[in-house]
Image (cartoon, helix red, strand yellow):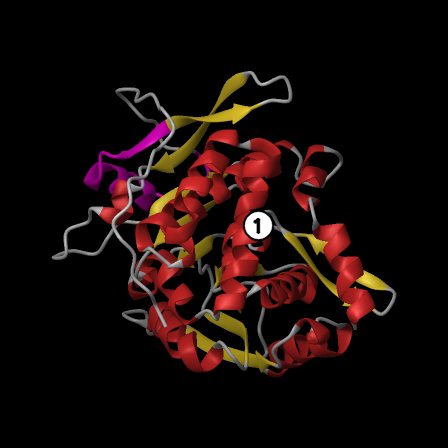
Amino acid sequence: MTSTANTISLSLPTTHNPSSLSKPKSLPDFYLRFRNQNPKLTRVGISVTSPNNRIRTLSTIRASTASVMEASSKEKALPTIVEVDLGNRSYPIYIGSGLLDQPELLQRHVHGKRVLVVTNSTVAPLYLDKVVDALTRGNPNVSVDSVILPDGEKYKNMETLMKVFDKAIESRLDRRCTFVALGGGVIGDMCGFAAASFLRGVNFIQIPTTVMAQVDSSVGGKTGINHPLGKNLIGAFYQPQCVLIDTDTLNTLPDRELASGLAEVIKYGLIRDAVFFEWQEKNMAALMARDPSAMAYAIKRSCENKAEVVSLDEKESGLRATLNLGHTFGHVSSRLRN
């Protein structure tokens, strides 16, 4: 299914590179090892275009896209890391190829001995075994249960959510367990809401497998289910321990779902990042052809934009509402069709 494209030139925004970098208080200790092994991981400024067309620079943690593209074939590629800065609830977004083959990334964020993987009937045959292996490889004290839900937006409801609670209770999970969302936006929203509710809150991890989920729904802590009278009316703001984006999962994504997700990428350029939008215009053919370098940069830049907005307005009291561009019309159109 994967297509190839000619090598493209990625024009990255101008950055500054301080000589020293202190460890962000919210990132795990092994962040320093990534930084020491890869000097391209730096604290840099994000250039953001304001309504009056002035460029301002905001500090964040990110890595050069080169950390994805230039890794030696003899060693595992280090992930790009984008931080969602929410004080003591901050968390990293790991982005890269083959990350499900790096078990330490997931295991660092599992604090107890019990894990529940929530996935669906489409994704489970593709990636469930790989995720279970990543959670347990060299870590025999961790046991993993799973619940496989039906696939589709129409199942994003209380009846389906109860299947997650049923499995958690039957498995006698405790407050130190970790829920793992493996799938697209529907799975991420339901698993996150289940984690926020079960025993009044347990840890959870996002492993998004669609472009839509990787660049939008897995980041920022919006969780919930639909009600017959409207979408996402029941839910909670509940942040994950981390988001792990293995770009290899996009190789099995249908073309229609790819295009749908890229609409979210375009959204960031339209509402707040003119430089990114210009880059998209030049590289859309490469994105549609699933060029690995182009996809890695588009996901990273989208996550940087989303992370910045969330850090400024987590509960959507103002600024974060701009990220809903197109969503309201889309929800209405979907409801009318159904």
Direction left: furthest residue: 74
Answer with the quarter of the image where residue 98 lies.
bottom left
Answer with the quarter of the image where residue 30 lies.
top left
**Residue 25: image location, x then y, percent:** 44, 34
The quadrant of the rendering that contains the C terminus is: bottom right
* Residue 156 located left or right of residue 293: right
Q: Is residue 120 above or below residue 3?
A: below
Q: Amino acid at mark 1?
A: Glu
Query: Across the whole image, how many numbered discs are drawn on residues?
Result: 1
Q: Is residue 116 above or below residue 64?
A: below
Q: Nearer the viewer, residue 174 or 223?
A: 223
Point 50% across, 37% down: residue: 277
Instruction: Provide the secondary structure element on which disc 1 rests.
Output: helix
Q: Is residue 197 above or below residue 28?
A: below
Q: Nearer the viewer, residue 107 or 53?
A: 53
Is residue 141 visible in the rendered image? The answer is no
The quadrant of the rendering that contains the N terminus is: bottom left
Q: Nearer the viewer, residue 48 or 259?
A: 259
Is residue 106 visible in the rendered image? The answer is yes
**Residue 10: image location, x then y, percent:** 32, 39
**Residue 160: image location, x then y, percent:** 70, 78
Q: Is residue 320 above or below residue 102?
A: above
Q: Nearer the viewer, residue 264 or 101?
A: 264
Residue under pointer 1: 264
**Residue 324: image location, x then y, percent:** 69, 45
- Is residue 30 within the magenta segment? yes
The part of the chain drawn in magenta is: 25-43
Q: Residues within 10 Å of mark 1 (few under 14, many from 20)?
A: many
- Is residue 31 within the magenta segment? yes
Point 32% across, 69% down: residue: 139
Direction right: furthest residue: 229
Point 43% across, 57% down: residue: 288
